[in-house]
Image: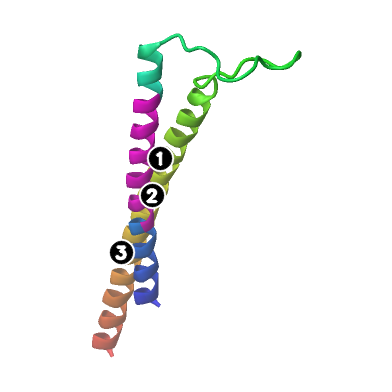
């Protein structure tokens, strides 16, 4: 059913656009956070006793690039999924229009 396909398309595109918007906001917040910390580079005294032997010191920026890259990849995937859904909808709409034209021509020919 063409209407059902179109509703699914509308839902998919809407979800992907919302996903992109939310992830871009999250990415921006994280980039601001990590960039501020990198720029400040303030020497802080460790809170509490020193870590036990065998433990490394805690580094806040150590994993940030992986998380930021992951968010960027998810945003890219959401954009690709949105583009694919749009192409698919255009193809389905064209096929539907062609079907209607052929059916109408067939009816008129009889």
**Secondary structure mostly seen in the magenta stretch:** helix
* Labelled disc at residue 12: none
Is 91 contained in the magenta span? no
Q: CA distance from mark 1 to mark 3?
A: 29 Å
- In the rendered image, which residue does mark 1 sit on? 75
Q: Nearer the viewer, residue 27 or 10?
A: 27
Extent of the magenta region: 15-33
Instruction: Pick whichever of labels 1 and 3 is earlier in the sequence.
Output: 1
- In the picture of the structure, the residue carrying the numbered disc 3 is 94
Q: Position of residue 83 (x, y in %)?
A: 36, 48
Q: Earlier in the sequence, mark 2 or mark 1?
A: 2
Instruction: Left or right? Give the position of 88 relative to 51.
Output: left
Of the 4 image quadrants, the one containing the N terminus is bottom left
What residue do we see at 32% from left, 45% from top? 21
Name the one closer to the observer, 95 or 45.
Answer: 45
Q: x and y percent of residue 71 in the render?
A: 45, 36
Instruction: Kindly report which numbered mark, 3 or 2, lies closer to the viewer in this rendering.
Output: 2
Vertically, is 69 above or below 61? below
Question: Which of the labelled discs sits on residue 19, or is there none?
Answer: 2
Q: Quadrant of residue 12?
A: bottom left
Q: CA distance from mark 2 to mark 1?
A: 8 Å
Q: Is residue 36 above or below residue 17?
A: above
**Which quadrant of the rendered structure holds the C terminus?**
bottom left
Task: In the displayed orientation, state which residue is furthest to the front.
Answer: 48
Give the percent coordinates (x, y) of residue 104.
26, 82
Circles 2 and 1 in contact, beta carbons < 8 Å? yes
Query: What's the residue at 68%, 17% (across, down)?
Result: 51
SS state under label 2: helix
């Amino acid at each position: 059913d063409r209407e059902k396909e179109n509703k699914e398309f509308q839902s998919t595109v809407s979800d992907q656009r919302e996903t992109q918007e939310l992830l871009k906001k999250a990415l921006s917040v994280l980039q601001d956070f990590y960039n501020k910390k990198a720029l400040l580079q303030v020497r802080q005294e460790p809170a509490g006793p020193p870590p036990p032997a065998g433990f490394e010191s805690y580094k806040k920026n150590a994993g940030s690039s992986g998380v930021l890259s992951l968010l960027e990849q998810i945003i890219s995937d959401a954009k690709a999924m949105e583009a694919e859904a749009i192409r698919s909808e255009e193809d389905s709409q064209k096929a539907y229009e062609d079907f209607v034209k052929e059916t109408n021509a067939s009816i008129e020919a009889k």
